[in-house]
Image: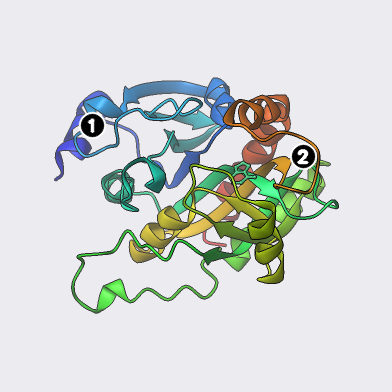
């Protein structure tokens, strides 16, 4: 048993979540909707990432969301912090060992299309790993050759689309391009990303999807569009702008997550 897992078992002996949520920039409001919550700062969990970026709390929450047992990772380590893509490896291994089978990821992203304006929610149908880094460096054996077809689980995506429609929440779907950051893109880079088939761009998520697939977790991921990407509008991009836009949409984003978690729990095994 890993040390982080034993700490969790000490603090919350009866929790058995099947669904893990990983909250990106601006999605932290969801933790206010948890009941019976136990909050464990990452710094108390060996191997979990230390606090890093504004808007990322760095806490593991265990509790219930609309009655469904969940584990919530509020905050992630980004590859731009130390050049490594495996910052969430121990955290995700620990949640798998705790019994999680599904990872529901969220992030903030820039849009590459006027038809996907700030405030939109976009389900990831696929991704482009433009950073060409992996959290699996150093792993051995054949399990590291992870199949990335349908990395974003088609059945979970169908459930999410239905749950969003039932809740009256517009939900787009598209391809997410992972860039290292922390600088935003140049307008020329954004034109290149569009040519490559990306719909949104961001600095996270892809390493955790790779890790989750390696661990055998099913993955669903959703972007909150906080801005039109560089060169597509007159707005000056900044992290503060990303957070402000995310905050403005946080209630809608949380409502979507609740609807999706309920649908996934009801459909058990879908
Ligand atoms: N680019 C990269 N990452 C982002 C953006 C963006 O425009 N917006 C939010 N995260």
Q: Is residue 146 visible in this depiction of the protein? A: yes
Q: Quadrant of ligand 1?
A: top right
Vertical placement of 217 versus 224: above or below? below
In-front residue for pair 226/147: 226
Please state the horizontal and vertical placement of residue 168, each as a whole percent of the image: 83, 41
Please state the horizontal and vertical placement of residue 160, each as a whole percent of the image: 67, 53
In-front residue for pair 188/37: 188
Q: What label sits on residue 118 in the rendered view?
A: 2
Callout 1 crowding tier (Cα within 10 Å): few <14, some 14–19, many ≥20: many
Say whether disc 2 or disc 1 marks the residue closer to the N-terminus: 1
* 40 horizontally vs 111: left or right: left
The residue indicated by pointer 1 is 45
Residue in view at x 57 percent, y 52 percent = 221
Residue in view at x 20 percent, y 27 percent = 10
Q: Is mark 2 within 8 Å of ligand 1?
A: no
In-front residue for pair 45/75: 75
Separation of marks 2 and 1 at Cα, in angstroms = 35 Å
* 200 horizontally vs 48: left or right: right
* 75 horizontally vs 108: left or right: left
Instruction: Examine the image and state in which quarter residue 14 appears.
Output: top left
Q: What label sits on residue 84 in the rendered view?
A: none
Vertical placement of 42 versus 217: above or below? above
Position of the C terminus, as image quadrant, is: bottom right
Q: Secondary structure at mark 2?
A: loop
Q: Is residue 158 visible in this depiction of the protein? A: no
Residue in view at x 63 percent, y 59 percent = 189
Vertical placement of 57 versus 213: above or below? above
Please state the horizontal and vertical placement of residue 56, each as a whole percent of the image: 46, 29
Position of the N terminus, as image quadrant, is: top left
Closer to viewer: mark 2 or mark 1: 2
Residue in view at x 65 percent, y 71 percent = 196
């Amino acid at each position: 048993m890993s040390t982080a897992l034993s700490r969790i078992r000490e603090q919350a002996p009866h929790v058995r979540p099947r669904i893990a949520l990983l909250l990106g920039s601006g999605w932290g409001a969801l933790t206010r909707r948890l009941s019976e919550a136990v909050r464990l700062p990452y710094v108390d969990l060996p191997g979990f990432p230390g606090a890093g970026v504004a808007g990322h709390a760095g806490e593991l929450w265990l509790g219930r969301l609309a009655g469904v047992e969940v584990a919530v990772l509020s905050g992630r380590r980004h590859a731009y912090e130390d050049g490594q893509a495996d910052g969430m490896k121990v955290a995700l291994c620990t949640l798998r060992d705790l019994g999680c089978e599904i990872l529901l990821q969220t992030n903030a992203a820039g849009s590459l299309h006027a038809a996907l304006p700030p405030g939109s929610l976009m389900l990831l149908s696929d991704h482009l790993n433009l950073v060409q880094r992996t959290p699996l460096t150093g792993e051995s054996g054949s399990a590291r050759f992870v199949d990335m077809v349908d990395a974003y689980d088609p059945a979970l995506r169908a459930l999410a689309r239905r749950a969003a429609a039932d809740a009256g929440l517009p939900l787009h779907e598209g391809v997410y391009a992972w860039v290292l950051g922390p600088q935003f893109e140049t307008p020329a880079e954004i034109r290149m990303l569009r040519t490559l088939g990306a719909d949104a761009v961001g600095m996270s998520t892809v390493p955790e999807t790779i890790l989750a697939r390696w661990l055998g977790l099913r993955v669903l991921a959703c972007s909150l569009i906080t801005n039109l990407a560089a060169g597509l509008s007159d707005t000056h991009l900044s992290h503060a702008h990303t957070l402000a836009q995310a905050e403005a949409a946080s209630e809608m984003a949380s409502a979507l997550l609740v609807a999706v978690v309920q649908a996934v729990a009801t459909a058990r095994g879908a």
